[in-house]
Image (cartoon, helix red, strand yellow):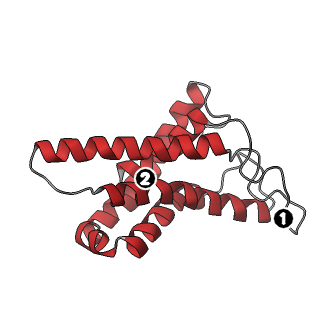
Amino acid sequence: MIPAYVPNSAAAVFGGGRSIDGGRNWSDGRRIFGEGKTWRGFIGGVLSGIIFGILLIVIENTFGWSIQTLLSVILLSLGALLGDLVKSFFKRRLDKKRGEEWLIADQYDLVAGSMLLVFVFDYGWAVQHITIAVLICILIITPLLHRGVNIIGYMIGVKDVPW
């Protein structure tokens, strides 16, 4: 899951610039995604996840393991931020403000997006490597990592809120 965990934090670091929705509103009059979702953050986040995933592949090959593939790395990285975008879309529909906490959705958007992409586009890899035990670990570890990383991001000034 490292290729899926890295993009959200990296997007916060690389963020800024032009928003993905270009400042446009949905039919309800609210922003489509919001000011916090930028092309620079999205691209920087996805590329960071892919780079970390490629490093994992190199390390795995050094030890004779074969877990990640380039396709799984790309799908996990891209899926994490697509999941975040979908969550932001619905967050705006519910009139939640940028940075407002949305329990469960904030923690699991990256899991939902990344799992959806790998199960749709790399099913064989997904069923081989994402077992029930692995999924349970992901569901337990994700909110803990999410909170810890966000607190660190808040402390170093990358995030406005610690969640």
Using a 10 Å C-alpha cutoff, classify the residue at mark 1 as few (fewer than 14 neighbours), some (14 to 19) or many (20 or more). Answer: few
Between the C-alphas of marks 2 and 1, the distance is 28 Å
The residue at 76%/51% (across/down) is 34
Using a 10 Å C-alpha cutoff, classify the residue at mark 2 as few (fewer than 14 neighbours), some (14 to 19) or many (20 or more). Answer: many
Foreground pick, 140 / 1: 1
Please say if 30 is above or below 22: below
Q: Which residue is mark 1?
A: 26
User: Which label sits on residue 129?
Assistant: none
Residue 4, image x, y percentages: 43, 52
The answer to which quarter of the image holds residue 150 is top right
Residue 104 appears in the picture as rendered: no
Foreground pick, 155 / 4: 4
Residue 131, image x, y percentages: 26, 70
Residue 1, image x, y percentages: 36, 54
Foreground pick, 103 / 6: 6
- For mark 2, give the secondary structure: helix
Please say if 138 is above or below 15: below
The residue at 68%/44% (across/down) is 38
Say left or right for 3 vs 99. left
Q: Residue furthest front?
A: 70
Residue 75, image x, y percentages: 42, 60
- For mark 1, give the secondary structure: loop
Q: Amino acid at mark 1?
A: Trp
Q: Which residue is mark 2?
A: 4
Say left or right for 17 vs 46. right
Give the quadrant of the C terminus.
top right
